[in-house]
Image (cartoon, grey):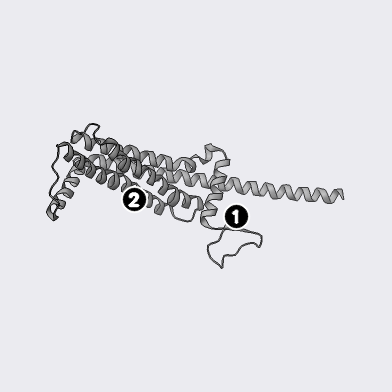
Amino acid sequence: MVFVQKSSRYEMPPDAIVLTPREAAKYQFENFERLNKSVTWPVLYGRKVIAISVLVQSSYLLMRFRTRYRLGNYGLLSTSLPFCAAPTLMSAAFQESFITEKVILQNECSVCLHTNSVLALAFFTHIVGGAGGAMATLYYAHNKGTYTLPPRSGSGLLKFGKDVFNLNRRFSNYHWIFLAFNILLSGTVIALQERATRQVTEILEQEDYDRVKESYLRSKQRRYNV
């Protein structure tokens, strides 16, 4: 068995293998990869599901913004990379490092994990994808002549921020739909990951029991042979 040391006073068998939380998560993840994928798929592919959701939502918002200012393909790559691709990759990394890893280690409550996951999804979708995409859209719309940037002053920056807010408010229905979907999606993914973790733990415990039993029977057989 593998024990995660939580403090210097943590009682462990003398022959136990001591791992840091990151090492323990890596070791456990390797067990997920070698076991039946029908059991472990939520842990293996959960972050990809979350990342795809962020990609679709941020891309849709950006498309609506660009359509509103009739940009066509103008500046499409320059706005898609930082405000669609980047939040997708960041959400996948966050989900793996701060959500899935803690689910595997079973060291944090489900409500806390769900809350953190929803907040991260809201940040990557609505702040990076929504607000950032709106700012980029207004900048390129100014270059194309479908929007006039305010002067670079305190009042001008305030007006620009207000325009970004109003552009997102125009599509507020989509923001609310995406938020509700993300709450449901993150809760479902975490629940499935927790169930998979419990099942894998039971499988590993059974493997350890079978291994000890087999070792005992072999030693007993050797004594009889002697």
Measured from the top left, where is residue 124 in percent x and y? 32, 46
Measured from the top left, where is residue 88 in percent x and y? 36, 42
User: Seen in the image, is 146 located left or right of residue 32?
Assistant: left
Give the amino acid type for the residue marked by disc 1 in the picture: Val
Q: Nearer the viewer, residue 208 or 75?
A: 75
Name the residue at the bottom extreme.
9
Spatial separation of the CA atoms under disc 1 and disc 2: 32 Å
User: How many dots with numbers?
Assistant: 2
Is tag 1's residue or tag 2's residue first in the polypeptide sequence?
A: 1
Q: Nearer the viewer, residue 81 or 92?
A: 81
Asked which quadrant contains residue 89, the reply is top left
Q: Kindly identify the residue that appears in the image at 83 percent across and 51 percent down.
A: 223
Q: Kindly identify the residue that appears in the image at 49 percent across and 53 percent down.
A: 106
Asked which quadrant contains residue 59, the reply is top left
Query: At numbered mark 1, what does the secondary structure look like: helix, strand or loop?
Result: strand
User: Seen in the image, is 82 located left or right of residue 219?
Assistant: left
Give the amino acid type for the residue marked by disc 2 in the picture: Leu
Say few, some or many: other residues with alpha carbon within 10 Å of mark 1 (under 14 / 14 to 19 / 20 or more): few
Q: Nearer the viewer, residue 207 or 50?
A: 50
Q: Nearer the viewer, residue 116 or 57?
A: 57
Image position of 112 with respect to 74: above or below: below
Locate the N terminus and report the quarter of the image it occupies.
bottom right
Query: At numbered mark 2, what does the secondary structure look like: helix, strand or loop?
Result: helix
Q: Are marks 1 and 2 in contact (CB under 8 Å)?
A: no
- In the rendered image, which residue does mark 2 sit on? 119
Q: Kindly identify the residue that appears in the image at 34 percent across and 39 percent down.
A: 55
- In the rendered image, which residue does mark 1 sit on? 2
Measured from the top left, where is residue 189 in percent x and y? 42, 43
Measured from the top left, where is residue 11 in percent x and y? 59, 65
User: Seen in the image, is 60 located left or right of residue 16?
Assistant: left
Name the residue at the top extreme.
72
Say few, some or many: other residues with alpha carbon within 10 Å of mark 2 (under 14 / 14 to 19 / 20 or more): some
